[in-house]
Image (cartoon, rainbow, N blue to C red):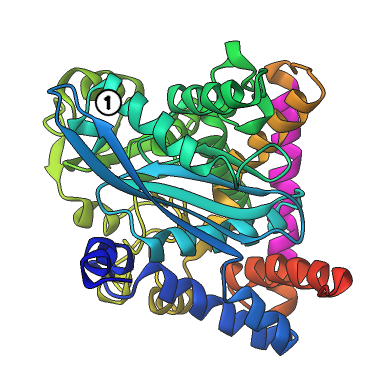
Amino acid sequence: MTKRVQKKFSYLNAKSTVGKSALDVALEQLRITAKKINLDPDIHEMLKHAKRSLVVSIPIKLDNGEVKVFMGCRVQHNGARGPFKGGIRYHPDVTLDEVTALAMWMTWKCAVVNIPYGGAKGGVSCNPKEMSRAELERLTRRYTTALLDVMGPLQDVPAPDVYTDAQVMAWIMDTYSQFKGHKVPECVTGKPIILGGSEGRAEATGRGVFICGREAIKRLGMKIKGVEVAVQGFGNVGWNAARIAYDTGCKIIAVSDSRGGIHCKKGLNPYKVYEHKKKNGSVVTYKGCENITNEELLELECDVLVPAALENQIAKANAGNIKAKIVAEGANGPTTTEADRILYEKEVFSVPDILANAGGVTVSYYEWVQNLNREHWPLEEVNRKLENKMVKSFNDVYETAKKEQSDMRTAALMLGIGRVGKAIKTLGIWP
């Protein structure tokens, strides 16, 4: 590889700006868990590495006629339990390390909720807020074309993630289908309902976070009505978690987005805040609320904290200042390993990402099953199945934590990694 190309790809190995990289955290979690469950060293060595990492350049013509090259990637971590599954994110800070960590967490997540998928993740380094709809469509279709050899309904099934949505999934499905010569709705999940998407998919991750937070509230002997909730990140996950919690009687005291946050001790209406954000581009300056930073939101006095933004938000430096009784992780990897230990010592009930935000991949699985069978289930059926799956998974992790006298993340990792390890051992290595 030439020096010029190395320089061009150097961003893909960048570290997180907050402490350790996401991959450092994921590998440390794997190491600790492997020791706890006496994982075969050979299997541990296999799980440290992704099966496939594809880095692609994506040249597109901008609206002004200029050609710009974006960099993207797709990482497929482990497929011992089924086709690869994972979201695609559009974000200026996408790195290969980050995407590899997210793919690894997806492997554990699918195993924790016991659905037949392996983990994958993808991303494009871009700023979608600065791109037109036409530019995003061209970017998406070109990126999909670059992934054609490694994706498919029985191989790798993408889904939405940060700054991607149902429309992006529709473009992916259409591009893939055009190459196949017929409609293949099962090649991607999180699609618009009119194109085979599932009822309840848009809110599924946020609903799963709420269900896990509710179960944690029950375990602490608290009543859900009036519980004070702070949500960092008011995108799809945070908005839906806040909305569902509000509808159930919780008091939402703070929310934030990438530009900052708002705090209202007497409570706020997330529906009205959502309208304010649509009109003004951010939750900040909402009437009757105090503007705060994302960092300040994390340290507020509250019952439930939902970090639903990006990785490594709760770290060694601020974990000791967390005052919430429960942390329900809507984002992937929002808490570092050191912070985990601090929260556990403070007796904070942490519901880890690979359990709390698994509602999205669970309903994605339901969408995939519906597509494969050319069925469409009513919302009530989807939500009932999701409720049952999330409650059972929560109880599985909680009982494991009690048995092992560990925190919930360690218990979830023990379950997830243990199931993947057993699958690999049963399959064997061929040839």
Furthest-front residue in this view: 2
Q: Which residues are magenta?
A: 381-399
Q: What residue lies at 47% left-to-right and 42% top-to-bottom?
A: 146
Q: Using the image, determine if residue 145 lies above or below residue 99.
A: above
Q: Give coordinates of residue 98: x percent, y percent.
A: 39, 62
Q: Is residue 263 visible?
A: no
The residue identified by callout 1 is 135
In the image, residue 29 lies in the stretch drawn in magenta? no
- Crowd class of label 1 (few under 14; some 14 to 19; many from 20; radius 10 Å): some
Q: Using the image, determine if residue 193 lies above or below residue 175.
A: above
Q: Of helix, strand and loop, which one carries label 1?
A: helix
Q: Amino acid at mark 1?
A: Glu
Q: Quadrant of the N terminus?
A: bottom left
Left or right placement of residue 243 versus residue 133 in this view: right
Q: What residue lies at 29% left-to-right and 62% top-to-bottom?
A: 9
Residue 39 image-quadrant placement: bottom right
Q: Quadrant of the C terminus?
A: bottom right
Q: Using the image, determine if residue 378 lies above or below residue 142.
A: above
Residue 261 image-quadrant placement: top left
| Viewer-proximal residue among 236 and 85 | 85
Q: Is residue 371 visible?
A: yes
Left or right placement of residue 139 versus residue 165 in this view: left
Residue 132 image-quadrant placement: top left
Q: What residue lies at 58% left-to-right and 84% top-to-bottom?
A: 32
